[in-house]
Image (tube, rainbow, N blue to C red):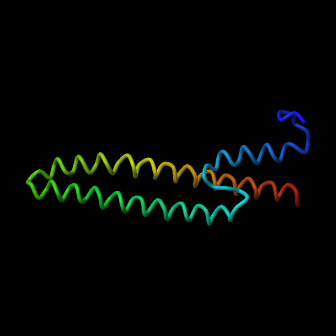
Amino acid sequence: MNPTSHESGDLPEARQSLENRSLGRLRLDAEPLEVQLARHRAAFHVLAGVTTAIAAAFFALFAAFDRPGVGLVVGALLWLPIVGVSWRDHRRLARAVEHQLQERARLDRDQNP
């Protein structure tokens, strides 16, 4: 069978592939999406906490040698990209999950009027 054909049996599989791509690390065939998103959120908070602790250590180290401004810059250069990208990724996943759940609810309403 041609992988690009659009017969009725291929549409759900193609749609599921597209949805899996938009959800990134989250999987439709695993645990409920809310549980997976909660785990991702917890991992984000741990990552932010560890990165904050390391940035604070750099600040404290430089402050001990009377250069708190340098420590603040070094800490910010470490903290901002890691936490910023992680936060952006989490927000993107949260929006994708919300969209996915709304789409499922709409399809359920359409199939079961």
In which quadrant is the C terminus drawn?
A: bottom right
* Residue that lies at the very extreme toward the left in this rendered image: 66
Q: In this view, does 83 lie to the left or right of 89?
A: left
Answer with left or right where residue 45 lies relative to residue 98.
Answer: left
**Residue 3, position in %: x, y?**
83, 35
Q: In this view, does 84 lie to the left or right of 32?
A: left
Residue in the picture at 52% in, 53% down: 90
Rendered residue at 37%/62% (across/down): 49
Quadrant containing the N terminus in the rendered view: top right
How many numbered tags mark residues here? 0
Identity of the residue drawn at 51% across and 62% down = 41
Residue 108, image x, y percentages: 82, 58
Residue 95 picture location, percent across and down: 59, 52
Q: In this view, does 76 lie to the left or right of 25?
A: left
Q: Which residue is drawn at 83% across and 33% down?
A: 4
In this view, the residue in front, 97 or 112, is 97
In front of the other: 112 or 8: 8
Is 38 above or below relative to 104? below
| Quadrant assignment, res 66 | bottom left
Residue at the extreme front of the image, as rendered: 1
| Residue 84: image location, x then y, percent | 41, 49
